[in-house]
Image: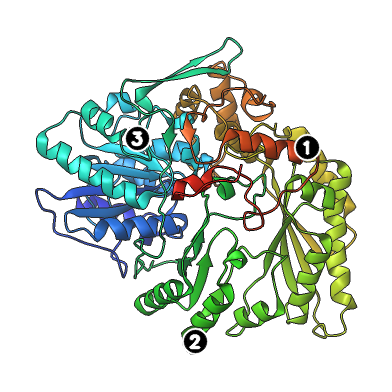
Amino acid sequence: MINHKDFSAALSRVQKPARYTAGEYGAVSKKPEPDMLRYALCFPDLYEVGMSHLGIKILYGLANSREDVWCERVFAPDIDMELEMRKRGIPLYGLESRQAIRTFDLIGFTLQYELSYTGILNMLDLAGLPLRSAERTSLWPIVIAGGPCACNPEPIADFIDLFVLGEGEEVSEDLIELYKKAKAEGWEKPAFLRAAATIEGIYVPSLYTVSYSPDGRVCNVTAAEGAPLPIKKRIVRDLDAAYYPDSFVVPFLDVVHDRAMVEIFRGCIRGCRFCQAGYIYRPVREKSADTVSRQARALCESTGYEELSLSSLSTSDHSQLEPMIDSLLSWSEQARINLSLPSLRVDNFSPELLEKVARVRKSSLTFAPEAGSQRLRDVINKNVTEQEVLDTCRTAFEGGYTAVKLYFMMGLPTETLEDIEAIADLCQKVVDLYYSLPTRPKGKTVTVTASVASFVPKPFTPFEFEPQDDAQTLAQKQKHLLNSLRSKKIRVNYHDNNTSFLEAMLARGDRRLCDVVERAFRAGSKLDGWSEHFDMTRWTHAFDACGLDPAFYANRRRDYDEILPWDHLDYGVSKAHLIREHKQAIAACTSPNCREQCLGCGANALVGGVCDL
C-alpha cells in the first residue's frame, strides 16, 4: 500500500488530482483473498483518454464479474504527477487498491496507437519492473498486450510476454484459467508461456526467431517446437450472447468521451483500402436491435448519462438501424437523452435518420469523403460520389444544421496536386450549397471544417505495400491546399507530419525497432501522442544510434513477395486478397462491399463460413 502521507503530498502539487484517486461511482473494490488473481488493466495515456475507451470498460467489467479476480485500472500519469511519484518513491499503482502493480499477477496494456509505445515502457519503469521480458524471470507479473496495434507487435515484442491477437473477451477468460492453474501448481514462467501459446489468439514472441537479409528485410520467422505458425487471431462470434457491462465507472472530471456507449456491431462491410480497422475486425457481426436497446437503457439508468453513443466503424450500415433507433427513442426521448451516431456514411444518410437523431437535441455532424476527387475516392475504394456528399450536406442544412465537418486524408497512393485542389473545391461546393438553399436559417453563416490527416500505410490493408509521402512532400501539399481555398467559411485542420512519420515507422516496423523504442524512452519520450511532449529529435537520434534508417520503414515500397514483419500472424484476411485489392487500387477500380458480393478475403472462415473465391 502506498504511504498515505506521501500520496497526499503528491496530490497537493498536481493539476488534476482526480486522475489519481479513484473512488468514482461504478469503480470496483474487493477484499483481496490469498487465491484471488490480481489484474492491472493499463491504458498507456492520460486518464481522460483511457476512461473514454470502450474496450477498457468491457474488459474491466468482465474480469470483475468473477469473484476470483480483482481487476484495477491504471493510467499513465501526467508529467507533474510522474515527477512527484519518482521524487517520493511512489510506484505505479492500481487505482482501486493503491497497491503497486508489480505485485499483481497480470499486467495488461491496450495498444490503441503506435505513439503509446514509449508510454508503456515508462509505466513499466514506474512500476519498478525490468523493461525486457527476458529480464522478468518470475511467473508474476506476466505482462500482456492487445488491441489494434497487436496486428504488428514486433516493435515492442521484446518488452511484452504475450500478445492477444483479435478480440479479448474469450481469450482473457482462457488466460486467467491457465494462469490460476500455473500459479497453483508452481509452474515456471517458460512453462506458462509455452502453454499460453497453444491458446488460439495468443502470440508469445519469445518463442519465435526472426532472421534478416543483408538488405534489412525479414528473411524468415522460425517457431519453437510446439508453437503455432501462423498465429491466428481470436474473435467473438455471437455479440448478442457476449458479455457487455450494464454499468460504467463514471469519472469525477471531464474526459474525452463522457457518455454511455453501446457497441452495435464489429467489423465493416466497406473495404476502404486504407482502413486497418475495416480489415482486422472482419467479419461483420451485428447485435440485434433489442440487445442494443436493452444494453443502452441499462447503462443510462445505472450511470445517469444524458448522452448515448452507438459505437461501430460505420453505424449507418447496421442492417436494423431504423428499428434500432425507434426502439432507443421509445425511452430515450422521454428521458431527454441525446442520441449520437458517429461514423455515418454519406451514401445512406436520410432525412428520416436526421430527424430521429436530432429529435432530442442536435449534435454535430461529421462525414468522411476521405478524398476530394472521384478518381482518388475510387483508388481508396470509398464508393462515395461527390453528389452523395452534397446531397447529405443538403439534408443536414435543411434539417437546421449550419456546420459540418469533413474528414480527408493527404498523401494517399497515386495522389496528385489536382486531387489536393479537389479537397478545396468540394468544401467550396458545400459552402455554396448552403447559401443556395432558400430554407437555410436566416442570419446564420455556415462553417465547413476540413480535417486533413496524413496517410499512414498500415499492416493488413491493401496499402501495406505503399510508401508514405516524405515530410517535405506532405508540407508542399498542405501549402497547396491552403492556397486553393477560396472562402473564409472553410477551416482546415492538419495532423503533425512528424507524428505521422513516426506512426508509419512503427506501424510497419520489425523487431529491431525494440532497441529504438527503448532508446527514445531513455531519452525522455513517454507521452508522444501529445504535441507538447513530442520531440522528433529523440527518435531521430535513437534511429541513428541503432544504425537504422527511418525511411526504410516509412517511405519504402514493399514488393508483393517480401516477407513482412507481421506475415506470421493470421488476422483472417489473406495476403492474396490484399494484393488483388492493391492492384485494383492502382487501376482506380472499385470493389463492391461485402453485402453486395463476397470478394473472398478469407474472414468468413473465422465464423464457420465459406468465401466465394
Type of the residue with mark 3 = Leu
- 259 on left or right of 591: left
Residue 354: x and y in percent read 67, 78
Q: In this figure, which residue is indicated by the disc labeled 3?
A: 162
Q: CA distance from mark 1 to mark 2?
A: 48 Å
Mark 1 burial class by Cα count in 10 Å: few <14, some 14-19, many 20+: few
Type of the residue with mark 1 = Ile
Whether label 1 touches label 3, CB < 8 Å:
no
* 271 or 44, nearer to the observer: 271
Q: CA distance from mark 1 to mark 3?
A: 37 Å
Residue 524: x and y in percent read 48, 33
* 503 or 229, nearer to the observer: 229
Picture colour scheme: rainbow
Q: CA distance from mark 2 to mark 3?
A: 45 Å
| Residue at the (34%, 35%) spot, across then down | 162
Type of the residue with mark 2 = Ser
| Residue at the (85%, 41%) spot, across then down | 416
* 113 or 167, nearer to the observer: 167
Q: Residue furthest bottom?
A: 334
Label 3 sits on a secondary structure element that is: strand
Of circles 2 and 3, the one toward us is: 2
Establish if 439 lies above or below 94.
Answer: below
Q: In this figure, which residue is indicated by the disc labeled 1?
A: 586
Please tell me the numbered disc located at residue 330: 2
Of circles 1 and 3, the one toward us is: 1
**Which circle's residue, 2 or 3, is located before the other in the chain?**
3
Label 1 sits on a secondary structure element that is: helix
Establish if 354 lies above or below 131.
Answer: below
Label 2 sits on a secondary structure element that is: helix
Quadrant (top left, top right, bottom left, bottom right) of the C terminus: top right
| Residue at the (52%, 83%) spot, across then down | 329
Please tell me the numbered disc located at residue 341: none
